[in-house]
Image (cartoon, rainbow, N blue to C red):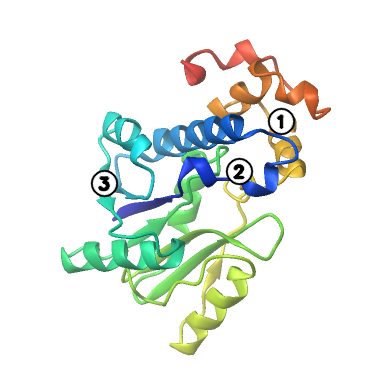
Amino acid sequence: MWAIVPIKRFATAKQRLRGALDGDERAELARAMLEDVLGVLSGLDWLDGVAVVLAEPGTIEIVRRVGARVIAEAENRGQSAAVADAAATLAAEGVATVVIIPGDVPLLSKAEMVDLLDSHCGAPSLTIVPARDGLGTNGLVCSPPCVIPFGFGEGSLGRHVRAARSVDIVPTLVECEGLGLDIDTPADLRALLEAPMTSRAQSFLVNAGIAARIGARPTGAADALGAAAS
């Protein structure tokens, strides 16, 4: 089993946060969230590997630091196409199952990953983690890797459910509090800061003064992050 993590370019990441964060802050937040996600995935010994679909050259050092594999995009054709190409590459190499995790879910945890995989059925099958808004998709487990066509973006949960049913698969939906929170809006930033302090992303928001600026009240002190922020 392999994990696939698609990455967007930091310079254009998180445009819906433009009213709350400037360009440099958005890029730094994206970088911190990626480090959070890769830190969890690289520590799962039951994963055979982690493949990062790369549209951001500046992340190569982060990716290689955790021993992940880089699958470079020939061109930026969007998240769905990038994930589909990576899944097809891994399937051609004999990988039977992939778990697709976005790079902007800083509260991802090992416990949630274990629960997610425990819920997954034998092939052919699809397991979906809905986004907190109930409309998006924040995680997929696919057996085989290309079991459905991918349709990320607004309203993707419904598309993925319909795609599964169109090939006679009843998808399993797994609610995950941490994985369900992707960071796109100021409200998401506040929700992140209201959660127990466990991530680099939270540490960045506090230490950069962003938490105070947006009126968020973190549940723990930034220095409690220690190793996570180092």
Left or right, 210 with reference to 96? right
Percent across and percent down for residue 90 are 23, 62
Percent across and percent down for residue 13 are 55, 45
Please determine whether, in this image, residue 171 is positioned above or below residue 36. below
Image quadrant where residue 223 sits: top right
The residue that mark 1 highlights is 193
Residue drawn at x 41%, y 74% as measured from the top left: 125
Percent across and percent down for residue 115 are 50, 51
Q: Secondary structure at mark 1?
A: helix
The alpha-carbon separation of the residues under discs 2 and 1 comes to 12 Å
Which badge, 3 or 2, comes first in the chain's sequence? Answer: 3
Which badge, 3 or 1, comes first in the chain's sequence? Answer: 3
Residue drawn at x 50%, y 41% as measured from the top left: 11
The residue that mark 2 highlights is 178
Graded by Cα atoms within 10 Å as few (under 14), some (14 to 19) or many (20 or more), the crowding at tag 3 reads some
Image quadrant where residue 138 sits: bottom right
Residue 218 at least partly seen: no
Which amino acid type is shown beneath numbered disc 2?
A: Gly
Graded by Cα atoms within 10 Å as few (under 14), some (14 to 19) or many (20 or more), the crowding at tag 2 reads some
Please determine whether, in this image, residue 126 is positioned above or below residue 133. below
Which amino acid type is shown beneath numbered disc 1?
A: Leu
Q: Which mark, by number, is residue 70?
A: 3
Q: Quadrant of the N terminus?
A: bottom left
Residues marked 3 and 2 touching at CB (< 8 Å): no
**Depth check, front residue: 124 or 131:** 131
Image quadrant where residue 85 sits: bottom left
- Closer mark to the observer between disc 2 and disc 1: 1
Residue drawn at x 58%, y 26% as measured from the top left: 198
